[in-house]
Amino acid sequence: MTQNGEHYRCGFVAVVGRPNVGKSTLINAVLGSKISIVSPKPQTTRHRILAVQSTDAYQLVFIDTPGLHRKADRAMNRMMNRTAAAALADADVILFVCEADRWKPEDQDVLERIKAARAPAIAVMNKVDRVHPKSALLEKIAAMSTRHDFAEIVPISARRKDNVDRLLAVLPDYVPESPPLYPDDIVTDRGEWFRVAELIREKLTLLLRDELPYGLTVQVERLDRKDDRVLIHAVIWVERDSQKRIVIGKGGSMLKEVGSAARVDIARQLGERVHLELWVKVKDNWADSDRDLKSLGFDTF
Ligand code: GDP
Ligand code: MG
């Protein structure tokens, strides 16, 4: 029983949608901190991440998914699709995130998967800050309601945190009565090493932009605490020598910039002083091989 005499609720909320609609931004807005990295490029999220929101009446366990990909021709894309499918199967309720101002064939693909899942779906129309005039929103909501029998349709702006509280207010109704699954002081099941690697990858994504190599990944190899500092040793894996040159930049300038931006963010997150060492290494075509993906710590099902 909770303080106000109701039964505790707890369940899984799958956050799905095509790449770049704002799923990670939404989860971060809900949790009020940077759980999952956010970037303007698609394919930023490759892992399944649990973010946990606990109150004295309910606990919501969010599953942030990699975007579903149409082309499943590379091992990495196939694995991302499997991860997202598993999130749907586990869910008590599905948050179908899309952009309020556009509807793409890829959105329809994701919706088809949602229709096949047993959990109720809430349509989250994100980025309403881009809809002008505001009156146009009503039309868009009406159009959305014809696409599927959604449990709710909630327009939000994840970036501005507009209406996110309304979404949170309805969510607990869709999870079952259950004791909490996680201690109330944890916000993610991902460890420190993973989060550090993700922050480094975020900086690479932001700084390299269109030059970001497709197969790039980051692996933390060491994380030690010594004196008053955290010593971190991380490897940036790329697929070819030419990509290695891009990541390092002229005279090491790019790698330096990535390193100092990442260090600032990691230090803020950990609340400690950080010494960061980055290495760039070439691993031939690892994104095509399931075995190599496993050795780099990707989820496999
Ligand atoms: P994901 O691939 O679905 O996880 O998308 P991200 O959370 O990484 O966001 C993709 C891009 O959309 C980023 O540039 C975000 O800053 C941007 N974005 C997210 N939410 C909003 C929003 O409410 N309004 C606007 N204008 N942009 C947003
Ligand atoms: Mg994401």
Image (tube, rainbow, N blue to C red):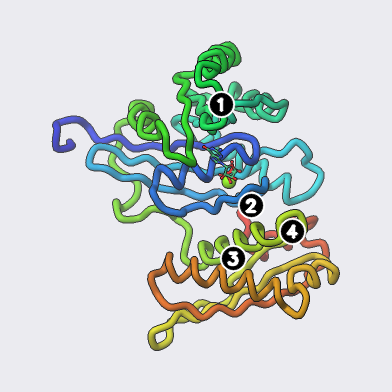
- Judged by depth in the image, the label closer to the viewer, 2 or 4, is 4
- The mark closer to the camera, 1 or 2, is 1
- The amino acid at mark 2 is Thr
Residue found at x 60% / y 73%: 259
Q: Name the residue under label 1.
A: 131
Q: Position of residue 159 (x, y in %)?
A: 49, 41
The span from disc 2 to disc 3 (Cα, nearest Å) is: 22 Å
Find ligand 1 in the image and state its quadrant. Answer: top right
Q: Which of marks 2 and 3 is nearer the N terminus?
A: 3
| Helix, strand or loop at mark 2 | loop
Amino acid at dot 4: Leu
Label 2 or label 4, whichever comes before in sequence order: 4
Label 2, label 4: how far apart the Cα atoms are: 24 Å
Crowding around mark 2 (Cα neighbors within 10 Å: few <14, some 14 to 19, many 20+) is few
Q: Quadrant of the N terminus?
A: top left
The residue that label 4 is drawn on is 212
Classify mark 3: residues with Cα within 10 Å, few (<14), some (14-19) or many (20+).
many
Element carrying mark 1: loop
At a point 45% along the width and 24% down the height, the residue shown is 154
What separation in Å lies between label 1 and label 2 (alpha carbons)? 39 Å
Q: Distance between the residues labelled 4 and 3?
A: 13 Å
* Circle on res. 200: 3
The residue pinned by badge 2 equals: 300
